[in-house]
Image: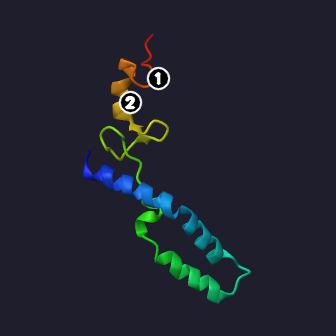
Amino acid sequence: MSNRIIRDHKRRLLVAKYELKRMHYKAIRQGRNLPNKVRYEYFFKLSRLPRNSSKTRVRNRCIFTGRPRSVYKLFRIPRIVSRELAPKGSSIGIHKSCW
């Protein structure tokens, strides 16, 4: 496995670990009815969480090659790999059309 895939996997684990805490901090920070002091405190708590625990840092990559672009979310493979796997029948429910 390449370093990019390993790094992305670690990010996914961090996102899962800090997801509830991050959502909790964001909800309190955005609460308009709370005093500004409390909101400001949770803003700093949110900023102290690891950067890689944010969902936006996760990149969809191919599970075979690690390619980051044109990846189908459902299958987690890019269009190039899907074109290779379709004629072989390796991917379930997909076959190359011919007429």
For the question of whether residue 28 can be seen, the reply is yes
The secondary element bearing badge 2 is classed as: helix
| Crowd class of label 1 (few under 14; some 14 to 19; many from 20; radius 10 Å) | some
Q: Is residue 38 above or below residue 88?
A: below
Residue 73 position within the rendered picture, expressed as x and y whole percent measured from the top left? 48, 41
Q: Is residue 57 above or below residue 6?
A: below
Farthest residue in the left direction? 2
Quadrant housing residue 12? bottom left
Residue pictured at 26% horizontal, 45% vertical: 1
Q: Is residue 49 above or below residue 57?
A: below
Disc assigned to residue 73: none
Identify the residue position indicated by label 1 in the image.
94
Q: Is residue 57 left or right of residue 33?
A: left
Disc assigned to residue 82: 2
Residue 96 position within the rendered picture, expressed as x and y whole percent measured from the top left? 42, 19
The secondary element bearing badge 1 is classed as: loop
